[in-house]
Image (spheres, helix red, strand yellow):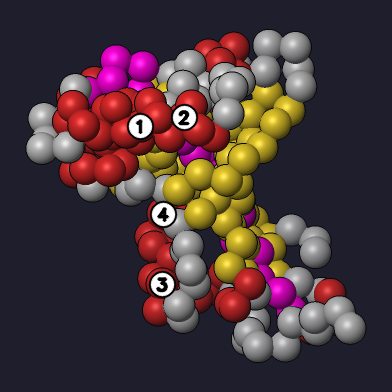
């Protein structure tokens, strides 16, 4: 049986923040509080040089007024797509809340200083994993990948993992953020903020 989306009251313009990133923080806090396994997981969609779209799940690693940050290898498929077309869309889906957020905008690289600062904050195993991975390339076998990790673990298990030159962060700088909330009879709420001349404007969309 299809979900009837009956848990939420109306999502009204008067009840949301004037700044969409403040509203996003409210909903993210709700997703954390309700016990979502990965509340920061977002589907990131890009388009490559040939116009082919692709999407994958990445983790949001912080956000501020400038945008949403995530990290990856700069030789990965997503990075190559962003080099060709530096725009992306991201979607969060919190089923326990019957809510979704869509974010669209241009993408820019974080500075090497910012990227390394985050890299150093990661667990040691994750640092070694980033150094080991040749993301999106074909690998001969799981065993060869594990062997490469074990070799790096033996070298750097005590710390001081070299910061990979091909790894770092991006910032998705939004110009549109939509808040979707399930409602009964599929008459859902959709409020979208659009940035016009540096000012956020709020609109309601048909479900």
Residue 66 in view of the camera: no
Which dot, 3 or 2, sits closer to the camera?
2
First along the sequence among labels 1 and 4: 4
Label count reads 4
Bin the neighbour count of mark 4 within 10 Å (Cα to Cα): few under 14, some 14-19, many 20 and up.
Answer: some
How far is mark 1 from mark 3, CA to CA? 32 Å
Residue 179 falls in image quadrant: bottom right
Which quadrant: the N terminus? Answer: bottom right
Rendered image: mark on residue 149: 1
Name the N-terminal-most of marks 2 and 4.
Answer: 4
- Residue at the (28%, 20%) spot, across then down: 164
**Cα distance in 3D space between marks 4 and 3:** 16 Å
- Determine crowd level at label 3: few under 14, some 14-19, many 20+ residues with C-alpha closer than 10 A: some
Nearer-N-terminus badge (1/3) = 3
From this view, report whether residue 11 is shown above or below residue 109: below
- At label 1, counting other C-alpha atoms closer than 10 Å, the crowd grade (few under 14, some 14-19, many 20 or more) is some
Mark 3, secondary structure of its residue: helix
Residue found 38% across the figure and 39% down from its top:
69
- What segment carries the magenta color? 163-183
> Where residue 32 is drawn, which disc sits there?
3
Q: Give the CA separation, mark 3 to mark 2.
A: 33 Å
> Which is more N-terminal, label 2 or label 3?
3
**In what element is the residue under mark 1?**
helix
Please name the residue that numbered disc 4 is placed on.
Answer: 21
Secondary structure of the magenta portion, mostly?
strand
Q: Is residue 31 depicted above or below 74 in this figure?
A: below
- Is label 1 or label 4 in front? 1
On the image, numbered disc 2 is attached to which residue?
145
């Amino acid at each position: 049986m299809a979900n009837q989306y009956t848990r939420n009251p109306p999502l009204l313009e008067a009840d949301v923040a004037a700044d969409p990133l403040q509203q996003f923080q409210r909903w993210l806090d709700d997703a954390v509080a309700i016990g979502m396994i990965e509340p920061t997981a977002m589907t990131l969609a890009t388009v490559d040089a040939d116009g082919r779209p692709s999407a994958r799940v990445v983790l949001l690693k912080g956000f501020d007024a400038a945008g949403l940050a995530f990290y990856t290898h700069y030789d990965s498929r997503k990075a190559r797509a962003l080099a060709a077309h530096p725009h992306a869309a991201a979607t969060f889906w919190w089923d326990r809340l019957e809510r979704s957020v869509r974010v669209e905008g241009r993408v820019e690289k974080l500075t090497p200083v910012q990227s390394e600062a985050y890299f150093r904050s990661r667990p040691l195993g994750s640092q070694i994993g980033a150094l080991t991975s040749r993301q999106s390339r074909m690998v001969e076998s799981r065993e060869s990948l594990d062997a490469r990790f074990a070799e790096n673990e033996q070298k750097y298990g005590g710390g001081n993992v070299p910061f990979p030159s091909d790894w770092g962060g991006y910032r998705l700088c939004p110009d549109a953020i939509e808040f979707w909330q399930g409602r009964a009879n599929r008459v859902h709420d959709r409020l979208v903020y659009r940035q016009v001349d540096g000012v956020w404007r709020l609109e309601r969309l048909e479900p």
